[in-house]
Image (cartoon, grey):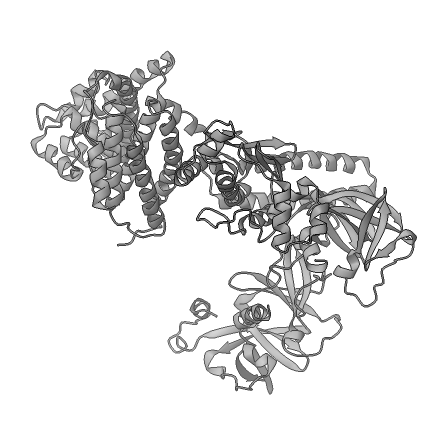
Amino acid sequence: MSIDLEDEILQDFLVEAGEILELLGEQLVELENTPDDLDLLNAIFRGFHTIKGGAGFLSIDAMVGVCHKAEDVFNVLRNGDRAVDTPLMDVILRVVDDVNVMFDLVRAGEMPKPVEQELLDTLQTFTVPDSADSEEADESIIKDASAAVSNELDVMLDSSTTETAAPADNGDITEEEFDKVLDELHGKGSFNVGNLEGDDKPKDAKKEFVAPSGDGDITEEEFDNYLDELHGKGKFNNSISEEVPAVEKAEVKKEEPKVEPKVEPKKEEPKTAAPKKAAPKKEAGGDTKAKAKSAPAETTVRVDTGILDSIMNMVGELVLVRNRFQTLAAEKEDEDIAKTVSNLDVVTADLQLAVMKTRMQPIKKVFGKFPRVVRDLSRQLGKEIKLELVGEETDLDKNLVEALADPLVHLVRNAVDHGVETPDVRMANDKPSEGTVILAASQEGDHIELSIKDDGAGMNADKLRGIAVRKGLMDEETAARLDDRDCFNLIFAPGFSTKDVISDVSGRGVGMDVVKTRISQMNGTVEVDSVEGEGSTITIKVPLTLAIMPTLMVKLGGQSFALPLASVLEILDLDMGQTQVVDGQMIIMVRNSALPLFYLSDWLIHKDDYIANKESNAHVVVVNSGGRQIGFVVDQLVGQEEVVIKALGAKLHGLDGLAGATITGDGQIALILDVPGLMNKYVD
Amino acid sequence: MSDDENSSNVIIDGETVNDPLMQWVTFRLGDEKYGINVMQVQEVLRVTDIAPVPGAPGYVLGIINLRGNVVTVIDTRNRFGLLSKETDDSTRIVIIETDHHIIGIMVDSVAEVVDLRSSEIETAPNVGNDESSKYIQGVTSRDNELLILVDLNKFLSDEENEELDNY
């Protein structure tokens, strides 16, 4: 059976459930550290319940089944009838993995298969309380829940009024009509009724639902269940407390069937009664989670990232137009024009910043999965590791968040596998048996700094030198000349691994160079520092956004080229008469150190009539490429310009040394150079 | 060309339903006249500044600024195995929209738009290894002159495959 991916309800479910699943992963690992956190237990319970509700609405029975069981388990947990322990966590984490797999299937338009019966059975064993019933623990939840109930009932009835305008108009609704209304809200598809305490066999809601209209008797409990189902959001508990507004109760409970006027007030009363009931609660400052969740929802709008991307593109165009205006204004020397242009400049800059902000996401999105990664890995390796996350709220561009995910996973795995030692080794070295990995993010000016720090064994520079020589990456002399820092950076060299044994986790020596490549693709840098015996720190710096880049414009043979400013160190005016050729390489002495020189035009300009002037003074742009300083000789320096990166189009993908193209202030095209790529292609 | 494009040109008067009318933009390269499906032509430009791209395949002339978008321009003469020629007043860049991208092809001149019925198009004679014959969809005779209809999708995607093979 396949699923209609066009369905809006399904799309909403995918978005919502996707977020919940992500959150569940984090919450569960958190729960392991704070097993008694009632709020957390409730949050997880609600998470499963919401997924179940949504899945039920879409008739994804496999997902409903397993979520339902998980929900049961957490119901028992939050009632304090059972304590969180490791076997339980293992099973629950497995459940989340399975649900994730199902979720991916659904996203791909396939109907997932039910999980193995064995998992359900295991779950079932955890739904049995292992301590006495404690109603008190539930009290606060019930309060929250009832507030939510009133709110939701209100919303629901509101919508039911609008949807069935006709019956509402004449103020007279029959019980049958009301049922129909509910039915409509209910939508198509069958539901599993939310669990009543201790009751965990799924019921067919539809059947149940029809029944009351027959005998005309809806119990309060049932009605709540229906609300629950209709809403599909698990924000309330089905055990009804006294907090539920009396009116509601009175009206919902229909003692005398088929008495028409009775139903009418039911539609009216809760509408007015419920909010009244809910409002004082809010003022009272009760820590109602449901409200905390729903309040900010009104100030946010979900926007398709495609739209954001296109807005970003348009802002990019605007920046280009502004650049053109600036160029024109500079020629005209008219004060009015200059003023207007500078106004435009300010507005554009603000707009650019604002749009950039809309695309910002907290790094938490990536960090969130690490507690789980570290937990699983440390268990697998028999290590005790505590992961600390710092600066989770740091915002960065959505594309960057996604692009950083893989490299970060790799680095964290490395820190766990290579960095932190096993407990016995740590004990022997007078360290606490539990190692710490700190994952930190912070904004530093126009870039983001990320660091992965472990308090493990650290690296031995001499050992790294030895490996480099053994693997044939360099000869002994070269290795000996490297300072310690350079040695640490050897780990980014392709094929370099400090592990003698290849494990599942790492050791193949392909990872770190990929990390480095990925980071440089984002115009970022990665550095490593280490103190033997105390641990290592890997620092990544990436720009805030990928879309707009400050560059240095240069000209070669009349054509414009843009050098990313991030890699430009300085600009020098040099007398080319002073150059020397050493080992076939042209160099010049700058402040007593040798600077290798390259004529960019040799690489980039293939015009027959172009001859670079290699005699007199020349402009040299000193750039940093992989830790080396290199001088690029250019014909003309134009200046600094913010450019919008445009991918090279058809037939030009994957050209080494070019990061893209852009349109300059004078409407010309300039190619954006990729310094590491250029060096790779033409030098190494 | 897809069925969609065919059907959009169908004239429904009973007789011609199975013999759709299609429009072709004709251009010249050397002595030959070629036609491309009008549905795939976005616009025709005079030659502007083309920025050469170092390291690009030989048949890529460079990139142009098309109202803020960067568009690759292909030397059609090179693709068809003709000697390159200085640009002049009649040289044009035809901007083409294919499945995935927008691309410009440089031609000697653009002539007109002609209507052709399917029945008027003959399948191209297989001329072996001729560089240009791979992209030919069919030929037709008009005003005592041969009009060669180019299959743009093949013209553009074939290159890509070749390019991949070269690496």
Give the vertical position of B51 relative to A646 (above or below): below
Residue A439, horizontal then vertical, whole percent: 52, 33
* Residue A222 shown left or right of residue A154 in the figure: left
Residue under the point 77% across and 38% down:
A337
In the foreground, A304 or A293: A293
* Residue A253 shown left or right of residue B47 in the figure: left
- Residue A582 falls in image quadrant: bottom right
Quadrant showing the C terminus of chain A:
bottom right
Give the vertical position of A201 relative to B34 (above or below): above
Quadrant showing the N terminus of chain A:
bottom left
In the foreground, A117 or A601: A117
- Residue B95 falls in image quadrant: bottom right
In the displayed orientation, state which residue is furthest to the top.
A284
* Residue A183 shown left or right of residue A353 in the figure: left
* Residue A163 shown left or right of residue A392 in the figure: left
Residue A562, horizontal then vertical, whole percent: 72, 50
In the foreground, A349 or A603: A603
Q: Residue A458: tell me if it is visible.
A: yes
Residue under the point 16% across and 31% down:
A199
